Image (tube, rainbow, N blue to C red):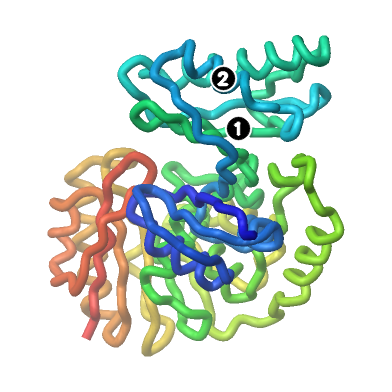
Amino acid sequence: MPNQYFATVARGLEKVAAQELKKLSAKNIEITFAGVYFQGDKSLLYRANIWSRTILRFLMPIFTIQCNDELELYNNVNKIDWSQFLTTEQTFAVNCTGKNLKLNHTHFTALQIKNSIIDQQRDRFKERSTIDPKNPNILINAHISENSCILSLDSSGNSLHRRGYRAAMGFAPIKESLAAALLDIAEWTPDICLLDPMCGSGTIPIEATLKSLNIAVGLNRKSFGFQFWQDFDEKLYKNIINEAIKKQRKKLKAPIFGNDCDLSVIKQAKANAKKCNIEEYIHFVKMALKDIEAPFDKGIVICNPPYGKRIGNSQELGKLYKLLGDILKHRFKGWVAYILSEDKKLTQQIGLRASSRASIYNGSLNCTLLKYDLY
């Protein structure tokens, strides 16, 4: 019988994540707010963690309990036999989301669950696990909704957007998972030339290159949460890793470009690409926006220009967006451009009519991805 899992995603990317899970052969896919329910076996869970480019975490729900208040929460957590998931030698942590009338502070709720588990261990084994909030062996997720609490094991550990290659970051870096999602929304495929004219630390070109070379993004990670589970199948895991390595390609089908006006930022981008052994594949070049030309007759431009919330002032940025629009209109005929921005006034400065718009969250910022067909 297949297991039930839950994939957590950034708001606005639920459909993209569902498509990714479908390609991985997940069953009974159901989209919900900031996540996707699906079913599959242990092999699927391992492969999903290793291959997923747009999903943040994979949770395995284990119990749903009543939690009208802190006492009921504590008692119902204590009724669960936690020795089937956690030994006293292992470290653990609890991450909580959601709230109700009595349990309205996530840190307090997480503390009640931790205390209940530790008290059970002391009563049964005269020993207890150590709490490690940064890098626990076992990460427990608790989600409060009305008067019930869904308890899950986090199979990913650290968020999957942390690929392990981005030691160097620009001023306002885009998450790796969001960059990968933008490529999917833009319907970019490896046979299409890609250019990011304001690439910053290179996340969009790097994610495109990893996808083009069919490199599983989880290969760079030190570990996953499921590797500390009691039913971890090391042989199955190694087979999936070896299978992923064999599927890698050696050549790009179309070139990938990343430009930025700041040389130090371009050096960061190259350092990040080098960390995942793809620096030779990407054309990172220091170039001012005003000097950029289309390298081919057709292709896709994807960029995440500054919004003003994090970088720059509105007057300077207005000029930058106008210049971006002029460059696209006059030098990129035959291309398609996708611009992610939080500021509607700034995108109006582009001076082009968007053929479509999609609402996407970049962290806590509610942004819009605008598509421009450049005839």
116 sits left or right of 195 in the view: right
In terms of secondary structure, where does tag 1 sit? strand
Q: Residues within 10 Å of mark 1 (few under 14, many from 20)?
A: many
136 sits left or right of 71 in the view: right
The residue under label 2 is which amino acid type? Answer: Ile
Q: Where is the N terminus found, in terms of image quarters?
A: bottom right
The residue under label 1 is which amino acid type? Answer: Ile
Q: How crowded is mark 2: few (under 14 residues within 10 Å), some or many (20 or more)?
A: many
Q: Is residue 306 visible?
A: yes
Q: Which residue is drawn at 41% across and 15% down?
A: 69
Residue 113: assigned label: 2
Q: What x and y, as percent, mark residue 15?
A: 38, 63
Residue 17 vs 195, above or below: the answer is above
Q: What x and y, as percent, mark residue 9?
A: 44, 50
Q: Which of marks 1 and 2 is nearer the N terminus?
A: 2
CB under 8 Å between discs 1 and 2: yes
> What residue is pinned by disc 1?
140
Residue 58 vs 245, above or below: the answer is above
Q: Where is the C terminus found, in terms of image quarters?
A: bottom left
Q: What x and y, as percent, mark residue 241?
A: 77, 63
